[in-house]
Amino acid sequence: MLSATLVLTWREVVKWVRRRPVLVMSLVTPIFWIALFGKSFNPLNLLQPQVQGVPPGLLEQVRSLLTQAVESMFGTRDFFTYVATGMLAVFALFQSMFGAVGVVFERRIGYLTRLLVAPIPRSSIFFSKVLGSMFRISVLSLVLFTIGLLMGMQLRPGIGLPDLLGAWGAIMLLSLGLSSLFTGMAFNITNQEVLFAIANLVNLPLMFSSSALFPLDQMPSWLQTVARVNPISHTADLVRHLLIGKPLPEPLTSVAYLTVLSLVLLGIGYMAAQRGMREA
């Protein structure tokens, strides 16, 4: 099983590398989010008072208070940094969803049928798809992180390799769970339009009901309840805690939550994939 999984995973990687237009398009959406939304909208600029006749000293004090309020709210004075770090988690969501489209496509052209009759464990087909998706997310997250730095994302002073690896680990936990779930669903879907419809139905509610773009404290109470169980929130909060130093009361709780949820989603996705492969 291990040998077959590695071979099929390598095939997923080679197939993805050779499709350069797909690679480029995979980065367009998150770059637009961090560049357009993160750079154009800055709460600090919106709150800066522009009142004629106010003494300069008083105006400077008001601006200082507003700056402290924004820093307390977002954990950084730069809203772009807040959005860019949150989009690393959202990016894993997008890629996990649309990465499963390949399963439906291979089923329609008959390649999946050839895999199912090959003398390999069927579980290796599922795990290779999940690992291939995680590899793509890992590489593209690094590219997105680099682009964020070039555009002005500010990391906390003294950040080290353990912090970077910890942030990467949080993203990988999220990717494992979501990739497993959507890959398992894809094995039971015969039409790509259905999968796209499900993705479009789920991705924006998950993104906007998380702390990826705004702090939980600024949400209505009912939405805060939803956001606290949203894995995007836990991932984004962990990434910000490690990369920009935003306070997080119980980071280990978020790690444990993501670990348990990812394993549960892995089990659900695996069972769904087995069902789909039996009926293929």
Image: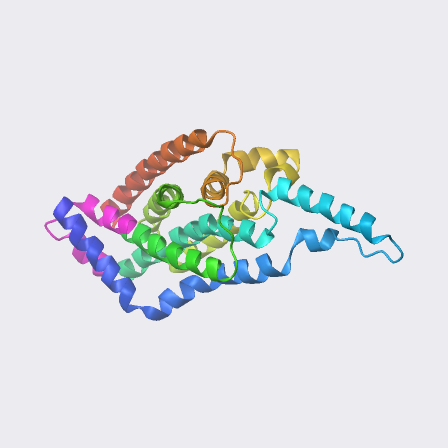
Residue 76 in view: yes
Q: Quadrant of the N terminus?
A: top left
Residue 162 is drawn in which quadrant?
A: top left
Q: Nearer the viewer, residue 217 or 112?
A: 217
Q: Nearer the viewer, residue 273 or 219?
A: 219
In the rendered image, residue 117 lying in the magenta stretch gets the answer yes
Q: Is residue 131 left or right of residue 42?
A: left
Seen in the picture, residue 35 relative to 100 is either above or below; the reply is below
Q: Is residue 215 left or right of residue 112?
A: right
Tell me the residue at 27%/68% (across/down).
18
Seen in the picture, residue 249 relative to 100 is either above or below; the reply is above
What colour scheme was applied to this rendering of the protein?
Answer: rainbow
Residue 19, image x, y percentages: 31, 68
Residue 147, image x, y percentages: 45, 61
In the rendered image, residue 95 lying in the magenta stretch gets the answer no
Dominant SS type (magenta): helix
Tell me the residue at 36%/43% (across/down).
181
Tell me the residue at 34%/52% (across/down).
138
Region rendered in magenta: 110-131
Tell me the residue at 25%/42% (across/down).
274
Residue 172 in view: no
